[in-house]
Image: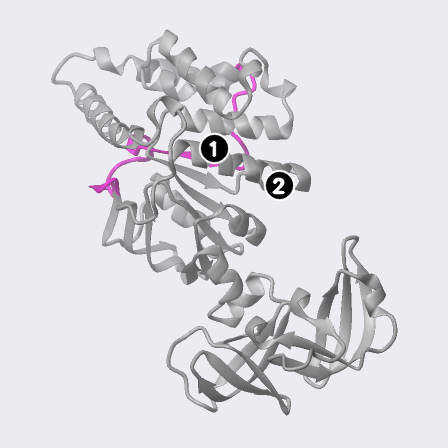
Amino acid sequence: MACWLLAERLADRLSRVRIIRDGSVGHRRAERRRSLITTTSERSSRATPDLKLGEKTKLNAPPILEIVHATHRYGDTVALDDVSVAARQGEFLTILGESGSGKTTLLRMISGLERPSEVQALRLNGEDVVDLPAYERNCTTVFQSYALFPHLTVGKNVEYGLRVRGVPAGEREERARAALGMVRLEDTFERRIHQLSGGQRQRVALARAIVTRPAMLLLDEPLGALDEKLRQDMQVELMEIHKRLSMTFVYITHSQEEALTMSDRIILMRRGKIAQEGTPQELFDQPASRFTAAFMGVENLMEGKLVALQGDRARVEVAGQVIVGRWPGGVINPGEDVVAGVRAERLHLGPPPAQAEANWLPCSLQGSIYKGKYLDQTATTPVGEIKIRLWEQSAAQGEPGGIWWKQSDCMVMRP
C-alpha cells in the first residue's frame, strides 16, 4: 500500500509543478516537458483527434521513429549491435525474435528506459530524444504485467497519466471514458481492477496508454499472459484499435503468429542484429536464411549445394536428389551451400499431377500425430525425414509411394 500511496503523492506533486515560481529549475523543466508533449501531441492528434475514427496513414509517410546505428552493451554482452530502425506514421511495426535477441532492449531504448551505449541518431517526430528521459518522450508503453493500480477504480487508472500532466478533473474523466469506449469497456469506469478478467485488464492498460494521445504506442509482449483463445481475440481487438487511431504501434513479441496476423512490417532479430525485415508475406514466403525460415515455421529444411540458377529458379542437389525452388535474390555461385525448404502443409502424398512443375521424392510413411484439425505425418525419404500436414486423415492410409510439392512452394536460401 505504501508504494501505491507514494505513486499518488508523486502524481499530485507533478500536477502542481506549474505553480512553481518563474525562473526556478522546476518551472523551466516542466515548461520544457509540456512544450515537447504539446508539440508532438499536436502532430499526432491530426491523425487521432479526440480518439475518433480515422483512415490508416499510408505506408509511404515520413518516419515518426528513426534509430540510426544503435549499439547497447550490458558489461561485456552486446545486446544490440549496430541496429537501424525506422517506423512510419500509422504503421504497425512488429519487432520479432527469440529470448535474448535484443527486441526488448530496443523497445526500452525507444521509450527512454535505456540509454544506448552508442547511437548516431534517435529521433521521434523528427526531434532528437537521445538525452530526454522517458517521462519527457511522447510515447507510451503497454507492459505484459499491465502495471495497474489495484486500489484505484478502472476510471482512475485510465486517468492517471492525465492527472500527472495536470489535466483538469472534468477533462480527465471525459477523455478516460472515451478511451474506455475505444476498448469497449464503457461500463467498467467505477469498477475495481480485481473485478475484471485478464482480457479486460489488458484493455484497461491499453486505454490508459492511449488516453494521453501519444505519438507512438509501444507494446512489450502485452498478450503473453493470456490464454490462447483470449490472445486471438485480443489480436483482432488491437488491429481494430490501430485502424481507428491511425497511431504508430511498435509491438514486441516472440510469437510469429501474432506478428503475421497484425503487422504491416516485421523486423526479425537474432543475437542483437536484424536477421530480416519485410512484410509478413515476405518473411513467411521468402525467408532469406535458414534461421528466418525455421523461426517462421518452415518444418522441412534440407541442406544441399546449388547446381544452377536460372532467373529466380534454383536447382539444388540434396543427398543425390535434385530439388528446384525459388531463389529470393542476390549473387550466388554454383557449388555454394544452400538450404531448400518447404512447409508441411504444401506437401502432397502420391505422384504429382501430369505436366506439373513439381518436386517428387520416394517415401515410406512412419508415425503420425493427431492435432485435431489435421494430422502431422512423418515420412522417410532419401533426403531424410519429412513432415507432412494432412487435412484429410484418410490420405495417410496405405503406402503412397512418394511425396510431391510445387516448385513455387519450395524456398531456396542461404544457410
The kind of residue tagged 2 is Gln
Indicate left or right for 54 with 199 as reference: left
- Above or below residue 360? Residue 349 is above
Residue at the (46%, 39%) spot, across then down: 219
Tell me the tag on residue 241: 1
Q: Rounded to the nearest whole Å, what is the CA distance between mark 2 and mark 1?
A: 15 Å
In this view, the residue in front, 406 or 275, is 406
- Above or below residue 261? Residue 276 is below
Does residue 12 appear in this view? yes
Q: Quadrant of residue 356?
A: bottom right
Residue at the (65%, 75%) spot, across then down: 405
- Above or below residue 263? Residue 275 is below
The quadrant of the rendering that contains the N terminus is top right
Protein image colouring? one colour
Q: Position of residue 263 (x, y in %)?
A: 47, 48
The span shown in magenta is 124-153
Dot 1, how many residues are within 10 Å of its Cα: few (below 14), some (14-19), or many (20+)?
some
- Determine which residue is flagged by label 2: 232
Q: Would residue 133 be counted in the magenta stretch?
A: yes
Magenta stretch, main secondary structure, is: loop
